[in-house]
């Protein structure tokens, strides 16, 4: 899959409390959650995401709580992919499970806010159209690729359960 | 066939045993059977939605699927009441044995060990990041999201990547007032909030054996604050005594081989650790409490899955006994479970708290995540025994949380600024 879009850039240790504050966790509605995405980190996110749909973070993106509401709110707000130098473990699993594309790139720091990127998810290639730089991301393990090609963990398991019946 | 037994860490051994293997390698992806799954009123409704979407009809074992409504309970508003209702009805429909209603419930990570649900050697997954708490019992236990929880509830299995391990050898005798909280804050301050990312943290050494079970729970609880996957203590006599009084079930004790491979081995001399405070807005932003003077506060919270146990309440009561909370400071004490609440009541601790001007709450995660029962206004500061001090964690995005153990929190309640116990006693 190829994703072409512009970047909203954040720093290190973006935690799930700023991605979606707990005061909004009294719902599981993705649409409602999306209205408050990044509210405590960047009050202009909702406007920015209308024209820029790739998030670039630093180290330990998504640290903190296990709330799946965090990647759900990001996905429902229209974001097409998140690139970071590293991801917190639970956020990374959650993003893969719900089908939000995530890429680990040690060179993510070189990507600037507002740059236009072309991402090839299958090949693990990131091309920065603004600066002309090309970055690579390590390929995902086969098992995780299977989850992604199934369209998320739920679909993957659904097929397994159905085949048993 | 390789006849030589390859050395493994506790984390490797537990994961191997749960995936039907003799040995698992670091980085290997395995499909493992879990002993316990856990969900709460925030993560469970989403997991139930996914559970239904995947076409699951039954939970894999109604005795092993645990549900605790503890975050926004007793319900703070209509929406959270609706979320709890989804979980309650699901629990009824599936005849869930370990669903704990308000009145029986406590903060999940204090409750499950107390009820003897988690045992040494278990593999536990919970849709709450602080599920790593049960590492104090010698279990491999970690936080997951709602979709993973749905899969684990439906199949009893989940995929894991076998983590590398960092060993922390705790030595020395901790000083007066020093508890597990100071040790883990010190460690996080040293290695950073991503210092153990994807890793198992293993706590061992003579000082580990000196620590109470309550302090061990606190340390394991905050492994996630360093990015850790597990936070595992070696099982000793204290662990066995704790477990024996709570469960008659059999369990297996796993212990790292002496020649197991570690990514790093870090020695911590606990006798040198002073009372710690983590300043906003990261748990790694630690200082000695003695260097944290002149920070004026508005609120103190003593409770949570990190520090709402008897050791914490006793320590707070020792400082608050015969003293008054400073004028204008709100001090909220939250025993983590009904049993802890009752034990504290019988010991006279609750009386001490109320006479000193604290408010005592029924068990809830409440203020820790800015849910209810002590949300901060703009510009307000709290000293809190909870686990996170991220932006907006306890309320307004321009409020501040200073993390500490119970001694500093109680002393600060008396003075209204960040204070060590020596200054008020």
Image (cartoon, rainbow, N blue to C red):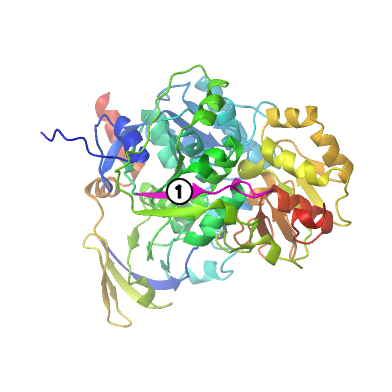
Could you tell whether B20 is left or right of B418 in the image? Answer: left
Instruction: Classify the position of the N terminus of chain A by image quarter.
Output: bottom left
Q: Inspect this view and state whether residue B207 appears.
A: yes
Up-down: is A110 above or below B349? below
Question: What is the tally of numbered marks visible in this picture?
Answer: 1
Residue B66, given in percent of the width and then of the height, sits at 52, 29
Q: At x 86% / y 55%, what residue is drawn?
A: B326
Residue B297, given in percent of the width and then of the height, sits at 77, 61
Q: Viewer-proximal residue, B194 or A120? A: B194
Question: Which residue lies most toward the top here?
Answer: B248
Q: Inspect this view and state whether residue A19 appears.
A: no
The chain to which mark 1 is attached is B
Q: At x 33% / y 53%, what residue is drawn?
A: B263
Up-down: is A138 above or below B52? below
Q: Give neighbour class at mark 1: few <14, some 14-19, many 20+ (Cα, 10 Å).
A: some
- Can you tell which quarter of the image residue B417 is in? bottom right
Q: Which residue is mark 1?
A: B169
Q: Viewer-proximal residue, B398 or A155? A: B398
Could you tell whether B355 is left or right of B382 in the image? Answer: right
Up-down: is B83 above or below A137? above
Instruction: Classify the position of the C terminus of chain A by image quarter.
Output: top left
Residue A155, given in percent of the width and then of the height, sits at 32, 40
B52 within the magenta span: no
Q: Viewer-proximal residue, A158 or B321? A: B321
Q: At x 29% / y 32%, what residue is drawn?
A: B19
Residue bounds of the magenta highlight = B165-180
Question: Which residue lies most toward the front here?
Answer: B172
């Amino acid at each position: 899959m190829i994703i072409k879009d512009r970047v909203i850039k954040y720093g290190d240790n973006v935690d799930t409390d700023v991605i979606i504050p707990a005061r909004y966790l009294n719902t599981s509605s993705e649409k409602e959650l999306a209205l408050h995405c990044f509210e405590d980190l960047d009050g202009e996110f909702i406007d920015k995401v209308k024209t820029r749909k790739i998030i670039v973070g630093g180290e330990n993106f998504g640290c903190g709580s296990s709330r799946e509401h965090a990647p759900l709110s990001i996905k429902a707000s229209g974001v097409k992919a998140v690139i970071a130098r590293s991801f917190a473990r639970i956020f990374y699993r959650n993003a893969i499970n719900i089908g939000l594309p995530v890429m680990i790139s040690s060179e993510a720091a070189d990507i600037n806010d507002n740059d236009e990127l072309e991402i090839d998810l299958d090949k693990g290639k990131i091309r920065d159209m603004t600066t002309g730089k090309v970055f690579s991301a390590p390929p995902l393990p086969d098992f995780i690729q299977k989850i992604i090609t199934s369209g998320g963990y739920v679909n993957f398991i659904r097929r397994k359960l159905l085949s048993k019946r | 066939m390789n006849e030589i037994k390859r050395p493994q860490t506790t984390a490797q051994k537990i994961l191997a045993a749960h995936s039907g293997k003799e040995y698992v390698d670091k980085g290997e992806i395995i499909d493992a059977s879990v002993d316990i799954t856990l969900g709460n009123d925030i993560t469970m409704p989403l997991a139930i939605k996914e559970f239904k979407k995947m076409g699951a009809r039954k939970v894999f074992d109604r005795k092993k699927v645990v549900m605790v409504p503890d975050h926004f309970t007793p319900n703070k508003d209509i929406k959270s009441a609706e979320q709890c209702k989804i979980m309650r009805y699901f629990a009824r429909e599936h005849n869930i044995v370990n669903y704990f209603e308000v009145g029986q419930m406590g903060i999940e990570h204090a409750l499950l060990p107390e009820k003897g649900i988690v045992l040494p050697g278990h593999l536990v997954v919970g849709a709450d990041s602080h599920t790593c708490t049960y590492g104090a019992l010698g279990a491999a236990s970690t936080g997951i999201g709602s979709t993973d929880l749905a899969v684990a509830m439906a199949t009893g299995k989940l995929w894991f990547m076998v983590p590398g391990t960092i060993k922390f050898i705790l030595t020395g005798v901790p000083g007066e007032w020093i508890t597990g909280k100071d040790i883990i804050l010190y460690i996080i301050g040293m290695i950073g909030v991503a210092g153990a990312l994807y890793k198992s943290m293993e706590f061992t050494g003579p000082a580990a054996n000196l620590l109470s079970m309550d302090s061990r729970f606190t340390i394991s609880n905050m492994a996630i604050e360093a990015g850790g996957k597990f936070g595992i203590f070696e099982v000793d006599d204290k662990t066995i005594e704790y477990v024996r009084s709570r469960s008659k079930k059999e369990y297996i004790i796993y212990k790292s081989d002496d020649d197991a491979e570690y990514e790093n081995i870090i020695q911590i001399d606990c006798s040198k650790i002073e009372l710690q405070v983590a300043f906003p807005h990261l748990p790694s932003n630690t200082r000695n409490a003695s260097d944290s003077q002149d920070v004026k506060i508005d609120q103190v919270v003593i409770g949570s899955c990190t520090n709402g146990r008897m050791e914490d309440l006793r320590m707070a009561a020792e400082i608050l006994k015969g003293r008054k909370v400073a004028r204008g400071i709100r001090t909220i004490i939250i025993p983590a479970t009904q049993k802890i609440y009752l034990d504290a009541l019988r010991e006279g601790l609750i009386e001490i708290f109320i006479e000193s001007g604290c408010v005592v709450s029924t068990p809830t995660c409440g203020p820790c995540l800015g849910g209810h029962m002590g949300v901060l206004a703009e510009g307000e500061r709290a000293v809190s025994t909870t686990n996170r001090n991220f932006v907006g964690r306890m309320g307004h995005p321009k409020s501040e949380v200073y993390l500490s153990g119970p001694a500093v929190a109680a002393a600060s309640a008396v003075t209204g600024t960040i204070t060590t116990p020596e200054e008020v006693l």
